[in-house]
């Protein structure tokens, strides 16, 4: 084979490897795909209820509306890391890795929450020193990553004079009250029906 053909073959192989590597970066890390369009990645082993997940999402939206933008990756188990399980229990290293993957779509503040701690990264954020120190002062999240993320967002937002509070989403006492009212209404309808039937029987006598 001529040297020209060898060179061409090498170029084709290099291009193919480049495409494969790009695909691996895009698909090998689940959070990087999800956080392109969503604000919170909850991981695959998340046990929090739908209402609790909605509460965290609402908190993040409220913070953004008030001028503090952040996206969050809750990494509760090694498999949440996809093709990079080696970064398990290394929240800051993973935050940098994930932030660089997302940079083209979302270059702002990114928070990673793992059971043993937090990671924070932002390509377009000039100085996160105070924010990292604030996270470092918080207790380790442990198993309840969602609650820890809520506290972290509140503390970080407060550094920028933004105050946000979690608001329960769906369910709760409101739903219970509505259910009770429905039961009472059904009972009243039944009682009224029985009274009418009895009245009709008395009239027929």
Image (cartoon, rainbow, N blue to C red):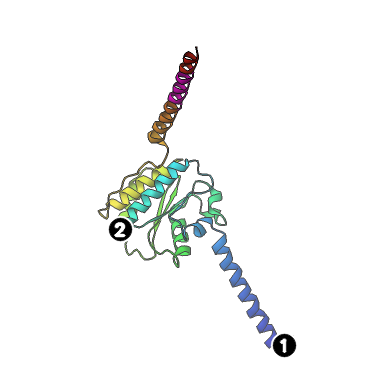
Q: Which residue is situated farthest in the right direction here? A: 1
Q: Which mark is residue 2?
A: 1
User: Helix, strand or loop at disc 2?
Assistant: loop
Nearer the observer: mark 2 or 1; the answer is 2
Residue 187, x across and y down, in percent: 45, 24
Q: Which residue is mark 2?
A: 67
Pick whichever, 181 or 97, lies toward us.
Answer: 181
Q: Would you say residue 118 is visible in this rendering?
A: yes
Residue 39 in which image quadrant: bottom left
User: Helix, strand or loop at disc 1?
Assistant: loop
Magenta span: 186-197
Q: Is residue 97 left or right of residue 66?
A: right
Residue 71, x across and y down, in percent: 41, 56
Query: For the stretch drawn in magenta, what is the main secondary structure?
Result: helix
- Between the C-alphas of marks 2 and 1, the distance is 61 Å
Residue 61, x across and y down, in percent: 37, 53
Q: Earlier in the sequence, mark 2 or mark 1?
A: 1
Q: Is residue 190 magenta?
A: yes
Pick whichever, 164 or 19, lies toward us.
Answer: 164
Query: Crowdedness of circle 2 by 10 Å Cα count: few (<14), some, many (20+)?
Result: few
> Residue at point 69% right, 83% down?
6
């Amino acid at each position: 084979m001529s040297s020209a053909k060898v060179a061409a073959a090498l170029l084709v192989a290099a291009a193919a490897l480049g495409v494969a590597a790009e695909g691996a970066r895009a698909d090998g890390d689940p959070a990087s795909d999800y956080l392109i369009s969503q604000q919170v990645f909850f991981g695959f082993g998340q046990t929090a209820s739908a209402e609790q997940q909605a509460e965290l999402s609402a908190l993040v939206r409220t913070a953004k509306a008030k001028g503090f933008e952040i996206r969050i990756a809750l990494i509760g188990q090694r498999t949440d890391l996809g093709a990079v399980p080696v970064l398990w229990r290394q929240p800051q290293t993973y935050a940098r890795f994930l932030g660089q993957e997302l940079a083209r779509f979302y270059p702002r503040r990114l928070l990673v929450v793992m059971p043993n701690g937090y990671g924070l990264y932002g390509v377009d954020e000039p100085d996160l020193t105070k924010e990292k120190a604030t996270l470092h002062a918080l207790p380790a999240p442990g198993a309840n990553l969602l609650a820890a993320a809520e506290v972290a967002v509140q503390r970080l937002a407060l550094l920028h004079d933004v105050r946000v509070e979690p608001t329960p989403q769906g369910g709760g006492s409101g739903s219970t009250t509505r259910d009770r009212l429905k039961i009472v209404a059904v009972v009243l309808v039944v009682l009224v029906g029985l009274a009418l039937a009895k009245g009709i029987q008395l009239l027929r006598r």
